[in-house]
Structure formats: C-alpha cells, structure tokens
Image (cartoon, rainbow, N blue to C red):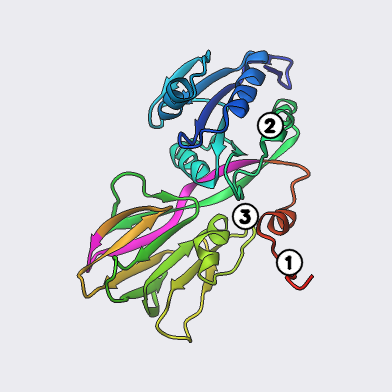
Amino acid sequence: MYMTMDGEIKMLRFALFGNEYQAKKSASIQKVLSYLSDRKAQVFIDRPFYDFITNDQHLSIDVAGVFDADDFDVDYVISMGGDGTFLKAASRVGQKEIPIIGINMGRLGFLADVSPGDIEKELDMLYSGEYRLERHTVIQLSVDGEPVSGNPYALNDIAILKRDNASMISIHTEINGEYLVTYQADGLIVSTPTGSTAYNLSNGGPIVVPEAGILCLTPVAPHSLYVRPIAINDDSEVRLKVESRSHNFLVAVDGRSEKLHEGSVITIRKAPFVIKIVKRHSHRYFSTLREKMMWGMDSRQ
C-alpha cells in the first residue's frame, strides 16, 4: 500500500510474469512475493508461471489470483526473466500501457535490467514514487490492409526474412508512398529504438537511444555493398512487397514468425500506444550500453 497525494491509502496490484524454463530462481521469486505480501499488495500470476512455481519449484504461494492471456487489471507488471520474457510480458500488456519493471534472471538483461540483488530496493522505489517512466515506441504490422492474426505489435522489431535455404528475396520498399529501394537480401529489419540493440545491431544497424522518434530499416545480408541501414521518422508508413523464388517468405514480429505468400502487401507503422518501462532516476542509458554490451571497450587494454 502507499499514500496518495490526497492522503488516501491505496493497495497496489501487480501482475507477475516469468520464464518457466529457468529453474534456479526460487529465492528471487520468494523475495518478490514476500516483499509484496508484507505491503498487503494484491499479486496476480500468469498461469504458466504459476504452474511452474507450484508444480516444478514446489513453492507454496498465496496470491490473489491466476490469469490467462491479457485478462489482468493491475497497477504494475513485474517481468522475471531475460529480455525475451520482458518482450512477452510487453506483448500481453499492449494497449493497457501498464508500467513494467524487468528483473533480470537471464544473461544480458538490457530491457530487464534489475539484478536479483536489487529487487527490494527497486520495489521500494515503486512505493516511494521515486522513479521515471520511459515511453517506448511500438510498431504494428498489417498484411493486405488487415491486422495479422494473433499479436501484430512489436516492441523490438518486425523482420521480413527468406525461408530456410531459399534464395535471397526482393523487397520493394516505399516510405509514405514514395519509392525508396528494392532490397536484394536475406531479409529486412524494421526496428524501433528499443530493438536497435537487438537483431538490428547484429546486422550492422545503428544504436538509437530510447524515445528518439526514429525507426531503422536494416537489410539482412544485402546483395549490394551500396545498400546501408537508413533511419526514418517513426510516424512514417513503411510499405513492403516481396518477391521470392519459393513464392513465400517469413515475417517475424518480435520473433513470432509466420509464413506469408509472395505478393502480400505489408504495412508497418507506429502503434497508437506505447510501452512504459519503469526506470530509476539514477539510470543512465549510456552506462547501460558500456556495462551490458561493453560498448566502446578497447580490446587492446
């Protein structure tokens, strides 16, 4: 609970997501649940994670409820895992715009940047209100003018890719109705600033700071040396049409891929909502780049 500006005592509600494939985190789970229990918070747990905690980890937990899909209404979301878990949680939050705090139980932890040892300090920050919210752009995919089945939204990137061992594909690209170029490549990545340090970066794309208002178009293994990544305003509409010798290709939305047929018209634009990420006031983006990704490190030293 915490005191609001008008003196009202409010009980906070949390939705907890986690990676059910990481077995060595019982202590961190218990630490989070114990902290929230002490503050009389209501905790709701994603069903697969609840089953993992109770059946695999054999923990006895007392929570307010278990939910499926996006059937939750809370004040904050806690993601316990790596960046993949964070992306899954963000996809479930979607248009709710509920602030997310990421506890890193994986390796890199660029989005989920809270270490297990700092859990209680970070939760203290939530209750004291001493934090800021980063608003991260989300992009959405439509095919032939219709939203794709499932979840059409991406926090990191939307990638157009050749299938398996097929030949490279041709990707005819327009920006706001104006022809840009036809990429002859293994694929094309349309990345948000959040995703600039992910698949985009591994293909030679630039690092873009959060909230920069930019999207990056980065080809995957382009046939021409003269095709380079390009940055555009994030209010632009990207329109793509693909030619493939196999007559089909893949589209991956934050890694969730499905097959599409040649001739499909793909449109990518900014979504009408953002993902809010809880950050400490002392958090510094460039420090995270240096510490997590060893950015600027000189291997000669």
Q: Which badge, 2 or 3, comes first in the chain's sequence?
A: 2
As drawn, 251 above or below 174: above
- Residue type at numbered disc 1: Met
From mark 2 to mark 1, how far is it between C-alphas? 28 Å
Q: Which badge, 1 or 3, comes first in the chain's sequence?
A: 3
Question: Crowdedness of circle 2 by 10 Å Cα count: few (<14), some, many (20+)?
Answer: some
Mark 2 or 1: the one toward you: 1
**What residue span does the magenta drawing correspond to?**
260-278
Question: Crowdedness of circle 3 by 10 Å Cα count: few (<14), some, many (20+)?
Answer: few
From mark 2 to mark 3, how far is it between C-alphas? 26 Å
**Callout 1: SS:** loop
**Residue holding disc 1:** 297
Q: Is residue 100 visible?
A: yes
Q: Is residue 245 left or right of residue 26?
A: left
**Residue holding disc 2:** 119
Tell me, yes or no, whether the highlighted magenta stretch contains residue 239: no
Q: Which badge, 2 or 1, comes first in the chain's sequence?
A: 2
Residue at x-position 21% and y-position 75%: 245
